[in-house]
Image (tube, rainbow, N blue to C red):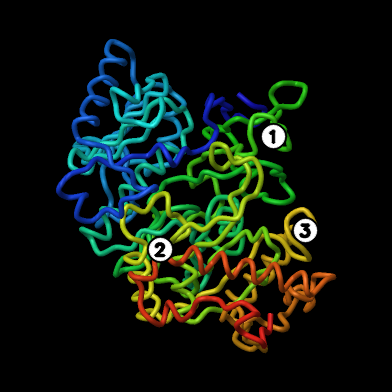
Amino acid sequence: MTDSGALAIDTGRFTGRSPKDRFIVSSAQTEQDVWWGDINQRISADFAAVIHADLMKHIKGAGVYVRDAFVGADPNYRIPLRVMTETSWSNLFAHNMFIRPTAEELTNFVPQWHVVCVPSFKADPDRHGTRGPNFAVLDFDKKLVLIGGTGYTGEIKKSMFSAMNFILPVDRNVLPMHCSANRGAEGDVAIFFGLSGTGKTTLSSDPKRMLIGDDEHGWSDDGVFNFEGGCYAKTIDLSDFKEPDIYRAIRFGAMLENIGFEADGVTPNFEDSEITENTRVSYPIHHIDGALNPSIAGHPDHVFFLTCDAFGVLPPVARLDPATAMYHFISGYTAKVAGTEDGITEPTAAFSAGFGEPFLPLHPARYAEMLADRMKKHNTKVWLVNTGWTAGSYGTGHRMKLSTTRALLDAVLEGKMDQVPMRRCERFGWEVPTEVPGVRSDVLDPRGTWTDAQAFDEKADHLVDLFNSNFERFKEGVLDEVRAAAPKSKRVAQTVGC
């Protein structure tokens, strides 16, 4: 127990997800719809059955912890879930992160899905068809998730997120989204797409707005709803000054993972990254003052694509037209932040379709088309926000100031961007403001922040080439106007304007 009353635990060997060890059971249902490949790896029903039998034999006679919960705040779309865990802290994580049923709802609770998490069970690749001793197996026919060989709690929530990413589009016509969301005093809704470390949790925890959720949501015909009942935030370099809402949420009931301590052994040292950069805390959403309950709201007025640009090329904010928005949603450019996944030790440029490719069982174009339909129907504006580097690439430039990002978001949400002058960037196809109230104008032009304009152009063209190379694998599945929205290097567009 820490000095704030939160529990601190050590997840062991794994301090981040292991996406290469997630498998989907091959069946008539999944063979038709799943986008098979490096992300969605097949495992046979026979191998899955052996894993299931051996895992249950491994825990036979031992005590297990059981938690009943819901995934999805909207009763029309939620899934009843039973989580069985080997450790009590894995069960506390499930209590924090999934939606907690009322006493009345528990009386006649009937789970549709089961999650079984046993970190001490190690798979035998020859016997079980896995890549190594750790695994997460999703079986859509049996409605079952099996997790073994890893104590990292994030595997529990992300396995069910993957399940929702298959179930809701195929069966319910609901768009699942890897995003945070909040609601303003007037009922306006904003959603924030982005991978871990891009600022979803931080930027959606706004004292002027009510938090809907910080990571996983659905967009139905009625509006947006949270999948979860809690938050799972990074704590590296956390402070009361920088992120007060998250800092104050770390109290009794919250659970810290893999943190360091001050000399007294009970006071967290959030600057300590000796175990991992991916230190985490889970807590129920009501630990955030002003969190919306139930976590349901209307249709989004604004969509933000958050990216942590390690090249220092992208502007701090830009407005996207529908075709450009679809291109960048499918591309999902960001940087993997140190420690978020096993083996990542420093920021690395990456593309992740839908800003959550490891959790997408279907082809990314299916999600993109659903997003496009909803944006057009509800007149939703789309913005790119760079929370990464400026004035140079990673190692020479510096990270965008949080105060600058917040000021830009406030300008969007308060309608001030409707009046500011914009210029078109011919390289990337979006509109960049030339002035924004409360923000220094020189920050808005990424090229102008570099001391060497030619070096900027070379780096920008390199990033354009990476975008186009990555998009090759999607070209056959998207509309012509989306392909035409691809960025152009200076070698192609002589007047770049960025």
Label 1 element class: loop
- The residue labelled by disc 3 is 398
Q: Residue at x 56, y 59 (%)?
A: 204
Q: Is residue 60 above or below residue 409?
A: above
- The residue labelled by disc 1 is 273
Task: Single out the residue that lies furthest toward the right.
Answer: 451
- The location of residue 26, given as percent across then percent down, is 22, 43
Front residue of 122/161: it is 122
Q: Amino acid at mark 1?
A: Ser
Q: Which of pointers 3 and 1 lies earlier in the amino acid sequence?
A: 1
Q: Is residue 496 above or below residue 70?
A: below
Q: Which of pointers 1 and 2 lies earlier in the amino acid sequence?
A: 1
- The location of residue 301, given as percent across then percent down, is 47, 75
User: Residue 365 vs residue 26: left or right?
Assistant: right
Label 2 element class: loop
Q: Residue at x 39, y 48 (%)?
A: 39
User: Residue 291 vs residue 434: left or right?
Assistant: left
Q: Quick one: quadrant of the C terminus?
A: bottom right
Q: Amino acid at mark 3?
A: His
Q: Residue at x 40, y 63 (%)?
A: 473
- Tell me the number on the disc at residue 333: none
Using the rendered view, name the quadrant where residue 99 is placed: top left
Res. 15 in view: yes
Q: Is residue 13 above or below residue 99?
A: above
Q: Quick one: quadrant of the N terminus?
A: top right
> Mark 2, residues whose alpha carbon is within 10 Å: few (<14), some, or many (≥20)?
few
In front: mark 2 or mark 3? 2
Q: Residue at x 23, y 59 (%)?
A: 170
Cα separation between marks 1 and 2: 36 Å
- The residue labelled by disc 2 is 473
